[in-house]
Image: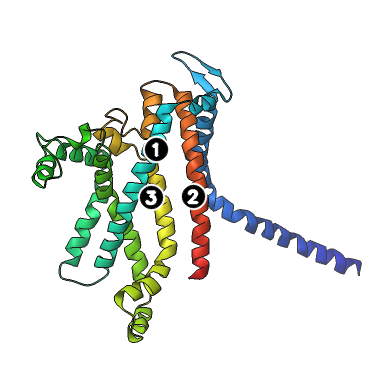
């Protein structure tokens, strides 16, 4: 009996070892990616947050606690930058989404030359944002660009002046450039989602007498809703943190009319050399975007349950 019990115990030990190794093995495979994420994302994030509690000068820095965050409460430039960021994000997102959805619906149907149109639609996404900003800045320049003269010919402007030089219209320049740049993202993702919808559902709805608009509302849109939620969330975050186009085209001017939070962070850090305050503003933007992402993820989960 004693021999049998000891044999059972000895037989059980390797199994425990095997179970422990099976638990650790997936983490060993994931360890290179985890280390890379920690080094590339987590460490800079922690350092950036720590900078927000310090005041930097030319040759030294000192701990100021919440002083940088208190300074933001009375910063009128930051308040205007937040309003500009909201306007820049909502306008860009609105036109990008609906134009991208329209292109996705168009490309989902067979027609002659569809592959050529598809390649042209996706082309702006491959152009570097810096080059896009320069190109659109030239297009809006009345000396070398045609757009001011077209707007004048259409009666939209009293004279062919630069849209980017007028504080009341300057934000429309980067918005138009950003819409052109971001439409392919929605077109690609929504087209992929459209391809995943079973064609039998549309055929059954058509047999039941549903109109094209009813089929879109009752069949297409519910299936697209989870994809729309995640793409809108991602694109909102990218637009809200996107400073390249605006800085290349206007550098936040004229008179701060295109000064968004990312541009303000860049100017504070690299022109005013106030890395502490720039880090505090960046933390504020991070908190706002995290709150927004949590809300959108909750909405997406509710949409997935109902599909």
Does residue 159 sit above or below 124 in this rendering? Answer: above
Mark 3 crowd level (few <14, some 14–19, many ≥20, 10 Å Cα): some
Compared with residue 274, is residue 18 higher up or lower down, i.e. above or below? below
Which residue, given by chain and number where applicable, does mark 3 sit on? 235
CA distance for labels 3 and 1: 18 Å
Closer to us: 245 or 15: 245
Indicate which disc residue 293 carries. Answer: 2
Taking depth in this image into account, of 209 and 277 the one nearest to the observer is 209
Quarter of the view holding residue 194: bottom left
Q: Residues within 10 Å of mark 1 (few under 14, many from 20)?
A: some
- The Cα atoms of the two marked residues, 2 and 1, are separated by 19 Å
In this view, 57 is above or below 130: above
In percent of the image, x 52 and y 39: which residue is there? 42
From where the camera sits, is residue 233 visible?
yes
Residue 57 spot, x, y in % from top left: 46, 15
The one of 32 and 111 positioned closer to us in this rendering: 111
Horizontal and vertical percent position of residue 21: 65, 56
Circle 2: is it few (<14), some (14-19), or many (20+) Cα within 10 Å?
some
User: Which picture quadrant has residue 79?
Assistant: top left
Kindly identify which numbered label has been placed on residue 272.
none
Q: Which mark is residue 83?
A: 1
Label 2: state its secondary structure: helix
Instruction: Tell me if 132 is positioned left or right of 60 in this view.
Output: left
Q: Is residue 14 left or right of residue 269?
A: right
Among the two numbered marks 3 and 1 on one chain, the one whose residue lies closer to the N terminus: 1
Residue 185 picture location, percent across and down: 32, 54
Q: Secondary structure at mark 1?
A: helix
- Disc 2 or disc 1, which is closer to the eye? 1
């Amino acid at each position: 009996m004693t021999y049998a019990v000891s044999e059972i115990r000895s037989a059980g030990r390797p199994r425990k070892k095997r179970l422990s190794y099976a638990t650790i093995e997936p983490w060993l495979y994931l360890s290179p990616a985890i280390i890379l994420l920690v080094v590339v994302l987590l460490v800079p994030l922690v350092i950036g947050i720590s900078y927000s509690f310090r005041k930097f000068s030319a040759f030294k820095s000192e701990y100021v606690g919440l002083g940088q965050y208190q300074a933001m409460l009375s910063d009128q430039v930051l308040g205007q930058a937040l309003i500009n960021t909201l306007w820049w994000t909502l306008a860009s997102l609105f036109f990008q989404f609906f134009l991208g959805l329209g292109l996705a619906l168009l490309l989902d149907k067979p027609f002659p030359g569809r592959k050529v149109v598809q390649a042209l639609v996706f082309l702006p996404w491959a152009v570097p944002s810096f080059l896009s900003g320069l190109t659109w800045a030239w297009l809006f320049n009345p000396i070398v660009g045609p757009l001011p003269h077209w707007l004048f010919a259409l009666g939209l402007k009293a004279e062919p002046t630069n849209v980017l030089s007028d504080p009341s219209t300057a934000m429309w320049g980067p918005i138009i450039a950003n819409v052109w740049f971001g439409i392919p993202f929605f077109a690609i993702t929504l087209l992929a989602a459209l391809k995943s919808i079973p064609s039998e559902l549309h055929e059954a709805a058509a047999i039941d007498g549903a109109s094209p608009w009813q089929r879109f509302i009752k069949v297409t849109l519910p299936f697209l809703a989870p994809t729309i939620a995640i793409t809108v969330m991602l694109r909102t975050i990218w637009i809200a943190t996107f400073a390249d186009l605006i800085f290349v085209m206007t550098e936040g001017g004229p008179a701060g009319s295109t000064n968004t939070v990312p541009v303000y962070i860049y100017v504070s850090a690299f022109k005013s050399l106030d890395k502490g305050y720039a880090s505090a503003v960046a933390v504020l933007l991070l908190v706002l975007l995290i709150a927004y992402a949590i809300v959108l993820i909750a909405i997406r989960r509710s949409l997935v349950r109902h599909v």
